[in-house]
Amino acid sequence: MDRLSNKRHKHAQRKRRVRKKILGTAERPRLTVFKSHKNISVQAVDDITGRTVASVSTLEKEFAEVKRSVDGAKVVGQKIAERLKAAKVKTVIFDRNGYRYHGIVKALADGARESGLEF
């Protein structure tokens, strides 16, 4: 197995291990994070109905100046908290999606907490 495919395999294992322990509901959706090389996406998912409650991505027009960084992640976290408040959701289950709780993922969670979202 070459280095890149091994890295992807290990990430998929971590993702499955984290994911099997959590389940989002309508009252407490699962807040999942995705990082690409240039962007950050986060969405709140109700796993029982398979519905996305709210989502935010740096691909949206209002985030044109926001980049994939710790500061950008904090802004995205604050925005998802605002959208979830509008949807009358106060608590979530955080799904780090196999990523380490460090840097961008931690900044996103901290930004959401600062805006009043409970984990």
Image (tube, rainbow, N blue to C red):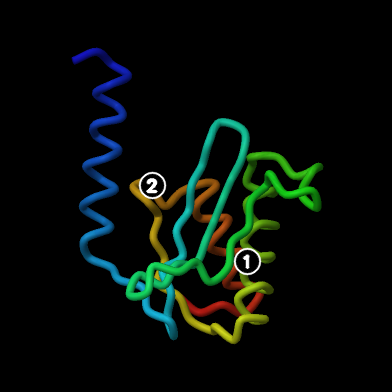
| Residue in the picture at 21% in, 53% down | 17
Residue sitting at x 24%, y 13%: 2
* Residue denoted by label 1: 80
Q: Residues within 10 Å of mark 1 (few under 14, many from 20)?
A: many
At 54% from the left and 84% from the top, the residue drawn is 90
Position of residue 62 measured from the top left corner of the image (x, y, whole percent): 80, 53
> Of the residues under marks 1 and 2, which one precedes in the sequence?
1
Judging by the rendered image, the residue that carries numbered circle 2 is: 100
- For disc 2, the neighbor class at 10 Å (few under 14, some 14 to 19, many from 20) is few
User: Of residues 83 and 73, which is closer to you in this image?
Assistant: 83
User: Dot 1: what SS?
Assistant: helix
Q: As displayed, is residue 101 above or below residue 22? A: above
Image quadrant where one finds the N terminus = top left
Measured from the top left, where is residue 63 in percent x and y? 76, 49
Describe residue 49's horizontal placement relative to residue 60 as left or right: left
Rendered location of residue 36, percent (x, y)? 53, 36
Three-letter code, disc 1: Ile
Asked whether, in this view, residue 16 is left or right of residue 73, the answer is left
Residue at 55% from the left image edge and 47% from the top image edge: 104
